[in-house]
């Protein structure tokens, strides 16, 4: 089973709202990722958690706040977003391998976010 | 700046033909290579990964890796209309913080009846 689930599927929020995106995996993976994808562009890495610790932050604005409550769950808290933050937000997971073999990432279905 | 390059396409092939998708990468130290398929409005789906020079086959898909030439390719045999999608090449760069995938811009494949 290579399933990563994400909720909600769609989210519309105003610029003053606070909302959260959720991601869950039950593959025993110890690395989880948040990506942002704009139309006709490849995914852009935002954050990496390895063994529940934030290990990579790709200089993401502080209006995006990640959280990893346990090894299966990953949240992305959103606050005071801008219309240009509208995108598909993707969660992925992998084994926390530090070399080839086991580092393949599996993506969830994504959350389509619209900021009005 | 580590780069992964792909032709954006569209690459059009007739049904039943072989589709050949190509990718080059700049970081000679890269060790893991992936192909993702992405249908419009959907998330990327991992279809192949390869770590060693040579060919790796899985059903109608063959991934080819040539580290000396810094080149990865994906062959799709007996192409079907359902193969029409964007194919993303990705290369993993291992850092002290973890795995970082660098994606190419994707090649749009159209399989025509």
Image: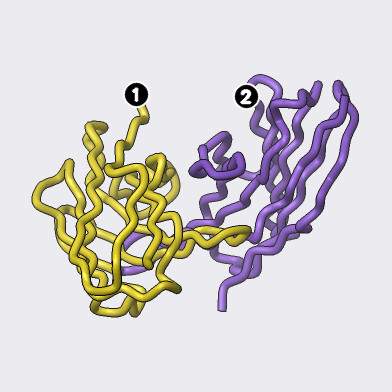
Q: Colour of chain A?
A: yellow
- Location of residue A12 in the rendering, given as x and y in whole percent from the top left corner: 34, 56
Location of mark 2 (residue): B58
| Residue under the image location 20 percent in, 54 percent down | A75
Q: Specify few, some or many for label 2: CA neighbours under 10 Å numbering under 14, 14-19, or 20 or more.
A: few
Q: Nearer the viewer, residue A82 or B20?
A: A82
Residue located at (66% from left, 27% from top): B57
Q: Quadrant of residue A84?
A: bottom left
Res B87 → quadrant: top right
SS class, disc 2: strand
Chain coloured purple here: B
Residue A69 horizontal/vertical position (percent): 9, 52
Q: Is residue B20 left or right of residue B74?
A: right
Q: Are marks 2 and 1 in contact (CB under 8 Å)?
A: no
The quadrant of the image that shows the N terminus of chain B is bottom right
Percent across and percent down for residue A24 are: 23, 40
Residue A106's place in the image compared with B59, above or below, is below
Q: Residue at x 70, y 60 (%)?
A: B70
Are the numbered discs 2 and 1 placed on the same chain, yes or no?
no
Mark nearest the camera among 2 and 1 is 1
Residue underneath mark 1: A1
Decide which of A89, A96 is in the foreground and name it: A89
* Quadrant for the C terminus of chain B in the image: top right
Q: Chain of mark 2?
A: B
């Amino acid at each position: 089973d290579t399933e990563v689930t994400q909720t909600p599927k769609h989210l519309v929020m105003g610029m003053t709202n606070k909302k959260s995106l959720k991601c869950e995996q039950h593959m025993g993976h110890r690395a989880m990722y948040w990506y942002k994808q704009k139309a006709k562009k490849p995914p852009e890495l935002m954050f990496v958690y390895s063994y529940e610790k934030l290990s990579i932050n790709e200089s993401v604005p502080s209006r995006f706040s990640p959280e990893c409550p346990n090894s299966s769950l990953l949240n992305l808290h959103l606050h005071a977003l801008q219309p240009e933050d509208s995108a598909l937000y993707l969660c992925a997971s992998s084994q926390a391998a530090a070399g080839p073999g086991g580092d393949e990432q599996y993506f969830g279905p994504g959350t389509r976010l619209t900021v009005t | 700046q580590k780069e992964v390059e792909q032709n954006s396409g569209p690459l059009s092939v007739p049904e039943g033909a072989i589709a050949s998708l190509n990718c080059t990468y700049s970081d000679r130290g890269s060790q893991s290579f992936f192909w993702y398929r992405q249908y419009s409005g959907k998330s990327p789906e991992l279809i192949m990964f390869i770590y060693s020079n040579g060919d790796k086959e899985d059903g109608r898909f063959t991934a080819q890796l040539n580290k000396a030439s810094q080149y990865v390719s994906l062959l799709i045999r007996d192409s079907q209309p359902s193969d029409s999608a964007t194919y993303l090449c990705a290369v993993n760069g291992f850092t002290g913080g973890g795995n970082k995938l660098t994606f190419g811009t994707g090649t749009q494949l159209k399989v025509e009846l």
